[in-house]
Image (cartoon, helix red, strand yellow):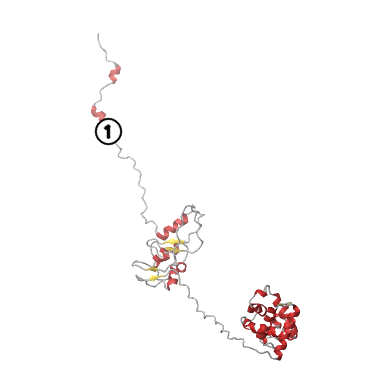
Amino acid sequence: MTTTSSPRRALGLTVPTVLLTTVATALVATPAQAHTPARIPLPPLTALPTGAVAAALAARTAPAELVPVTSYTVQDGDTLWDIAQAHGTTVAALYAANGLGSDSIIYPGQVLSLGGTAPAPAPAVAESATPAPAADTTGPGYDVVAGDTLWSIAHEHGITLAELYAANGLSPDSIIYPGQTLRFSAPAPAPAAVDPAPQPAADTYTAPQVVLDDVQTANAQHIIRVGRELGVSDRGIAIALATAMVESGLVNTPSGDRDSIGLFQQRPSTGWGTPEQIADADYAIRAFYLGTPHTNGLLDIPGWEGLGFSEAAQDVQISAFPARYGLWEPQADGWLAALG
């Protein structure tokens, strides 16, 4: 039986190994003309903005609702001109706001006032938080140590350079030295020397023993008689007699100190009556006991009988020398006993 080769078998001819390898290599190889994306040239490196410029850029990108800043912390490399330009102000304005001068030096970390709108209020702090103690600017002062600057001292103690200058009589070109003591506030002016108030001269008045003459006796009898008519006690009459002796010497004098008139030197200007009324001895005696619509008499003084002799007389007379009335008390009692 003759064997015939299968057509399927005839198609499965063996392919030489070298040919297969060549085809595979061709399939995976990168064609010489394969497309390579072109490189995009990068811009040259530029230094990032720092200091005042960076702060200004940050402010421009800040949300619109933020309150404009009123201070700026100095960065390395800053100048006053840079800061003024970046924040829309002038160098002169920075000088004025910070107590600086043309030869002032600024330092990294120094806080400069920019003026303008006040900052927004800080968020409320929890009640449990302990507030930071306020800087003590009333103490005896601060002793300068090596490395100190006026700015660092002011910053540490919570005051401005201008305040530190004013408290110590300094200026932007002043030099400080280790061991020097600086104040944080100007000393209070010493109170002006006040001359002590002049003391009144000692009252050397005395009550000599007096023998009444006829005029004095007649006036004393008149005082006693009116007192009896009004029901005044012996003590009240004795007070009236002593008062008349101190004021007028028991004489119905037409004048006296200022506008004083009569036995008791009563004054029209203080409400005792008209000059004509006061010159009438009977009117003057009754006014002493009973008073007038504008003055108090002895009987108007509440509890007058319980007062001291001089005190009761003084409440009627309002004298500059109230103790004098009591000096006549013994003699007044004797006149009353002899005449009344």
Provide residue 48's location: percent of width, then percent of height. 38, 56
Q: Nearer the viewer, residue 226 or 35?
A: 226
Provide residue 190's location: percent of width, then percent of height. 48, 75
Judge left or right: residue 197 versus residue 277: left
Q: Nearer the viewer, residue 111 or 195?
A: 195
Q: Quadrant of residue 202?
A: bottom right
Question: Is 303 drawn above or below residue 258 in the view shown?
Answer: above
Q: Nearer the viewer, residue 23 or 74?
A: 74
Question: Is 61 drawn above or below residue 29 in the view shown?
Answer: below
Q: Quadrant of residue 145?
A: bottom left
SS state under label 1: helix
Judge left or right: residue 190 versus residue 47: right
Indicate the quadrant containing the N terminus: top left, top right, bottom left or bottom right. Answer: top left
Judge left or right: residue 295 versus residue 78: right
Provide residue 141's location: percent of width, then percent of height. 41, 68
Q: Residue furthest top?
A: 1
Question: Is 326 drawn above or below residue 158 in the view shown?
Answer: below
Q: Nearer the viewer, residue 183 or 285?
A: 285
Q: Which residue is mark 1?
A: 25
Indicate the quadrant containing the C terminus: top left, top right, bottom left or bottom right. Answer: bottom right
Question: Is 13 drawn above or below residue 147 in the view shown?
Answer: above
Q: Residues within 10 Å of mark 1 (few under 14, many from 20)?
A: few
Q: Residue at x 72, y 79 (%)?
A: 289
Q: Residue furthest front?
A: 338
Provide residue 230's location: percent of width, then percent of height. 75, 78
